[in-house]
């Protein structure tokens, strides 16, 4: 069994949101997008997930063309892409999304047994003081690691 090979990571999601439940979803891509993802020409910054009429879509995820010269003329880097989930998971997502301050964010895009998957999560936005606590905790952990490393 092959392990996960992370292609794109959304570091800002962990800073801006408090992650609650995560799901693994397939994604509908066209051929040159697969090549582009494997080459690392993508970004999840500012992207989000919406549920529309029983379907789940990834919005604002930027996947650059693999070769700009050979890209289709009407290719849109930020087009909405359909995510593939089970009906039970879609129902859970819609219930969790309707809560106050809740949203669905993509955490990463990775390969799993040769298939490209997206890890999405229901999340609640952090307040400014929560972000400050995260920064403070990260700094203290870094200092502790430095002290252990120097000893």
Image (cartoon, helix red, strand yellow):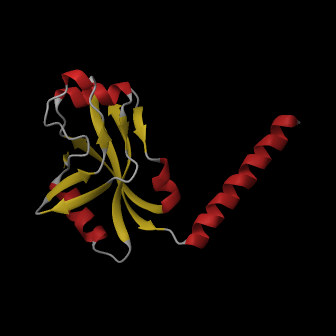
Instruction: Pick the residue in front: 68 or 9.
Output: 68
Where residue 129 sits, quadrant-wise, is bottom right
Residue farthest to the bottom, as pictured: 100
- Does residue 119 lie above or below 97 as drawn? above
> Do we see residue 113 in this rendering?
no
Image quadrant in which the C terminus is located: top right
Number of numbered discs on residues = 0
Left or right placement of residue 105 versus residue 145 in this view: left
Percent of width and height locating residue 71: 19, 27
Where residue 32 sits, quadrant-wise, is top left
Instruction: Pick the residue in front: 3 or 127.
Output: 127
Residue farthest to the left, as pictured: 53
Q: Residue at x 49, y 61 (%)?
A: 16
Left or right placement of residue 125 versus residue 131 in this view: left
Q: Residue at x 64, y 65 (%)?
A: 132
Instruction: Pick the residue in front: 31 or 77.
Output: 77
Left or right placement of residue 26 versus residue 46 in this view: left
Q: Residue at x 26, y 52 (%)?
A: 59
> Do we see residue 120 in this rendering?
yes
- Does residue 119 lie above or below 88 as drawn? above
- Does residue 82 lie above or below 37 as drawn? below
Percent of width and height locating residue 25: 26, 45
Percent of width and height locating residue 124: 42, 68
- Does residue 93 lie above or below 118 as drawn? below
Q: Residue at x 23, y 22 (%)?
A: 69
Image quadrant in which the N terminus is located: top left
Percent of width and height locating residue 51: 20, 61
């Amino acid at each position: 069994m092959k392990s996960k090979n992370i292609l794109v990571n959304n570091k800002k999601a962990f800073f801006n949101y408090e992650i609650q439940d995560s799901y693994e979803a397939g994604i509908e891509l066209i051929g040159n997008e697969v090549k582009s993802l494997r080459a690392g020409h993508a970004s999840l910054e500012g992207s989000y997930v919406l549920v529309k009429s029983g379907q789940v879509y990834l919005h604002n995820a930027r996947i650059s063309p693999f070769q700009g010269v050979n890209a289709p003329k009407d290719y849109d880097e930020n087009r909405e892409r359909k995510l593939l989930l089970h009906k039970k998971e879609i129902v859970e997502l819609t219930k969790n999304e309707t809560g106050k301050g809740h949203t669905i964010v993509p955490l990463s895009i990775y390969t799993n047994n040769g298939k490209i998957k997206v890890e999405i999560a229901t999340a609640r936005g952090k307040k400014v003081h929560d972000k400050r606590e995260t920064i403070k905790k990260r700094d203290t952990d870094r200092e502790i690691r430095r002290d252990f490393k120097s000893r």
